[in-house]
Image (cartoon, rainbow, N blue to C red):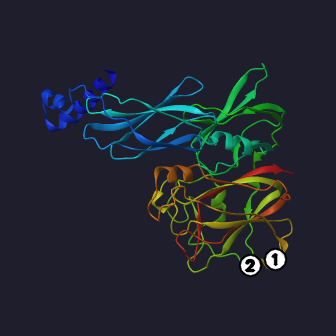
């Protein structure tokens, strides 16, 4: 009866648009009591967290769809339906690798179910357990970093809890991700020992075991930009118009005109690869940087296009050579600004824009030495230009 009411409601909604009458709806639902024939040649295949069922649907004009159902070990029921014209369906949302008994029915146009066909099947290891087995948690600057592998790119959440001074567990942050691998970091934590526990959950609320550990986040703070100044070496490019390298740390991402402080740009024809050089005023062990593209706030159409750096390098030195060569510099990091959607230029999704607004964060390896002088070297741009531009760079680490 419940299925009939649901189907009647769906058909009624559809008929609002086509002005059909109630008797028209009822005529769609067969009123005879015939039981549809059962499925044939049922096979099951275990996939990560899923069971794929294949079968042969009897040739019968009264069959409307196929339904499968089973009850999980936690008492929750999984159900899936597939059209009469398909020969497969997928039961998704298993949290373990137990053997499950599955019922499959054909459902007629009169909503009568066939005699069930029973099949036992075992899902392969669910993604949450693959992630859990690969997971490691380490101390990092200003917090902790979680490394993991997610080969299925499953949609999961990673709740991170710590024990507070009262001895109660509190959620520091819940990370939602479909990334194929880590790292993922939690920042803004004090430089004191803390007890953490971390698990992995999927959208069906299946949960892995807990990882319980005591870690001490490394001291980190944003560097003092009052000490920063441009260091123009002989091979550094000329700026475009009235632009200044100091625009990269002036906390201004809103101004749009040339020389107004909202972005820095190298001159036309100066080429890529090319760089900007900064004197940070004192030595610092850099922990991470956040790179903001031009257009992050006021010119969204410029994101991931034209002179926005794509591949780049970060170099550090304590005694840079006057000739501008890299002989006196150490490569601290080599990376790429990635567009989440992967769409062509001028096609940005809401996720692409949000990602750019938050800044592209890059972690400097722990083994990198403390440096006073910093070089950002653009190796390529999204628009394959002979210049590059940036909105801002934020610097974090341990100043001496």
In percent of width and height, residue 387 lies at 58, 74
The residue nearer to you, when weighing 284 against 288, is 288
CB under 8 Å between callouts 2 and 1? yes
Q: Earlier in the sequence, mark 2 or mark 1?
A: 2
How many neighbours does mark 2 have within 10 angstroms: few (below 14), some (14-19), or many (20 or more)?
Answer: few
Residue at the (86%, 65%) spot, across then down: 318
Q: In which image quadrant can residue 340 be found?
A: bottom right
> Which residue lies under the disc numbered 2?
234
**Category of crowding for the residue at label 1, using alpha-carbon neighbours closer than 10 angstroms: few (below 14), some (14–19), many (at least 20):** few
Is 137 above or below relative to 317?
above
Disc 1 target residue: 322
Residue 314, horizontal then vertical, whole percent: 73, 64
Q: Is residue 226 left or right of residue 49?
A: right
Residue 364 horizontal/vertical position (percent): 76, 56
Q: Quadrant of residue 250?
A: bottom right
In-image side of 33 versus 115 (left or right): left
* Residue 15 picture location, percent across and down: 19, 34
- The foreground one among 299 and 91 is 91
């Amino acid at each position: 009866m419940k299925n009939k009411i649901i189907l009647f409601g769906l058909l009624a909604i559809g008929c609002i648009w086509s002005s059909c009458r109630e008797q028209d709806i009822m005529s769609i639902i067969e009123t005879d009591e015939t039981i549809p024939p059962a499925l044939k040649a049922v096979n099951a295949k275990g996939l990560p967290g899923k069971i794929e069922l294949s079968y042969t649907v009897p040739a019968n004009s009264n069959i409307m769809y196929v339904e499968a159902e089973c009850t999980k070990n936690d008492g929750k029921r999984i159900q899936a339906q597939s059209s009469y014209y398909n020969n497969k369906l997928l039961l998704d949302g298993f949290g373990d690798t137990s053997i499950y008994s599955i019922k499959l029915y054909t459902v007629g146009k009169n909503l009568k179910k066939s005699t069930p066909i029973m099949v036992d099947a075992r899902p392969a290891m669910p993604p949450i357990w693959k992630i859990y087995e690969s997971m490691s948690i380490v101390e990092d600057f200003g917090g902790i970093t979680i490394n993991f592998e997610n080969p299925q790119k499953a949609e999961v959440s990673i709740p991170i809890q710590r024990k507070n001074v009262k001895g109660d567990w509190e959620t520091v942050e819940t990370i939602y991700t479909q990334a194929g691998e880590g790292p993922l970091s939690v920042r803004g934590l004090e430089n004191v020992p803390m007890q953490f526990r971390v698990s992995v959950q999927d959208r069906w609320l299946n949960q892995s075991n807990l990882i319980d550990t005591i870690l001490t986040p490394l001291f980190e703070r944003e560097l003092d930009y009052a000490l920063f100044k441009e260091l123009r070496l002989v091979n550094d490019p000329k700026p475009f118009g009235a632009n200044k390298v100091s625009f990269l740390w002036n906390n201004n991402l809103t101004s749009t005109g040339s020389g107004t402080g909202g972005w820095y740009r190298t001159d036309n024809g100066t080429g890529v690869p090319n760089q900007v050089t900064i004197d940070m005023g004192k030595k610092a062990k850099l922990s991470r940087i956040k790179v903001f593209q031009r257009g992050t706030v006021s010119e969204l159409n410029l994101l991931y296009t034209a002179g926005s750096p794509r591949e780049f390098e970060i170099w550090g030195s304590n005694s840079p050579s006057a000739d501008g060569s890299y002989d006196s510099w150490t490569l601290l990091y080599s990376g790429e600004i990635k567009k989440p959607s992967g769409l062509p230029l001028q096609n940005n999704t809401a996720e692409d824009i949000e990602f750019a607004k938050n800044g592209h964060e890059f972690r400097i390896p722990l083994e990198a030495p403390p440096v006073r002088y910093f070089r950002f070297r653009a190796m390529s741009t999204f628009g394959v230009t002979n210049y590059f531009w940036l909105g801002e760079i934020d610097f974090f680490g341990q100043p001496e």
